[in-house]
Image: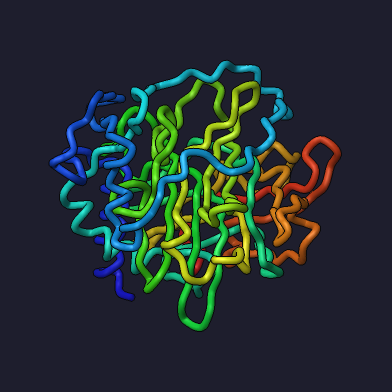
Amino acid sequence: MSTRVRMPLLMVFLHLLFSATIHADQNVMPLKIFKISENVTYDCIDIYKQPGLDHPLLKDHTIQLKPSVSKPELKNQTGNNKTYKRKMGCPDNTVPILRNSKEYINNTKLYTEKYFHALTGDSPGTHVAGVRSRDGPYRGVEGWISLHNLNIGRDQASYTQIYIGSGLNNQVNFIQAGWMLNINPSLGGDSNHWSYGFWKGKDGKGCYNTACPGFVQISQEVPIAQPLDQPGEDLLYYSIHQDKRTGNWWITKLIPKVPNIDIGYWPKELFDLMDTGANMVGVGGAVQDSRQISSPPMGNGKFPNGGSRDSALFPDIKVVNSNYEQRRIDYFPLEKLLDSPKCYGLRIGKIKILGFFFNYGGPGGNSCGV
């Protein structure tokens, strides 16, 4: 794929995160509006009229208001004693939906078709560092994700995620969630970091966050995509898991000393290769530079050569097996992913406090390859 094609894809990515002008459905009026910054606005939309339900595969879908089995609340294992502060709280029976630009909605299909993920081969300008296991079926993946500030250039991306998916021949289903560093700071809101979710399902169709139909938002206070600027929030804990009763794929945010927040789910109808679980899970960092000139930094920009907390960190990663039993990811056969050791590094370790963990990241540069 030529640079001429890749450049618009990265510009689309900018609009995915930071454009905000219209509703996906002009006929649905918000009951309440939260303006987080000049460029970031959320509308409280009737939960039964949210744009995610407009997907043709969800014509007969019945909303699941909570997982059939709640996850245990998270113990404060990180030493973070900060108090979580709510940014918004939509009225009962409404959910927060980020406004999205008309340009983004028009270009979502293009971006979805070209989106890089760990189930496919190399993508020019993209580099990865992480671990994965292909010994499924799996029902879920969860763990801590460290947040870091980085200086990156225009048309560059640096992100970190957990993912789960299946591949068969040339078809893939997958779900991915984590944080993304603002590609173009001049277009952002009041934070460099954003949470995000991405899925790809039947016939190669998929979507980013709630900008096109598919994802069903359930939480009244935490949207699938939002700026991450909580005081002292330097670690996220996300869980993606398949509901045992319905087969839907839930994303849950776990916060120490706060009840778990079930953000929402991707309905089972969206997928055709994940009915009885997925055959791969993984975690890691990735970067992308559409110009293929200089790759951006990954993680916190440092090679994992010092202590366990000196570089970007993935501690205590857990996987849910086919019987819905939770195991550490190193219980399964692991495959290391590192395609550019000149620019990024990967180190696996085990210590009592963190359990199984790995450090990753690096400064990037001009000799990372393509």
Which residue is drawn at the image coordinates 40% and 41% (left, top)? 217
Provide residue 25's location: percent of width, then percent of height.
18, 45
Between 114 and 31, the one lying in front of the other is 31
Q: Position of residue 364 (x, y in %)?
A: 51, 54
Residue 242 occupies which quadrant of the picture? bottom right
In this rendering, is residue 38 above or below 314? above
Quadrant assignment, res 7? bottom left
Residue that extends furthest to the left in the rendered view of this protein: 27
Could you say which is closer to the camera, residue 266 or residue 36?
266
Q: Tell me if residue 367 can be seen.
A: no
Q: Where 221 sits versus 116, above or below?
A: above
Q: Residue at x 60, y 33 (%)?
A: 254
49 displayed left or right of 88: left
Q: As drawn, which residue projects farthest toward the bottom? A: 169
Q: Is residue 165 visible?
A: yes
Rendering coords of residue 183 (x, y %): 35, 46
Instruction: Describe residue 365's horizontal placement relative to residue 92 as left or right.
Output: right
Count the numbered circles shown.
0
Q: Residue furthest right?
A: 352
- Quadrant of the image for the N terminus? bottom left
Residue 69, image x, y percentages = 63, 42
Judging from the image, the colouring scheme is rainbow
Residue at x 56% of width, y 22% of height: 232
Give 100 or 228, whichever is nearer the viewer.
100
Q: Residue at x 68, y 67 (%)?
A: 136
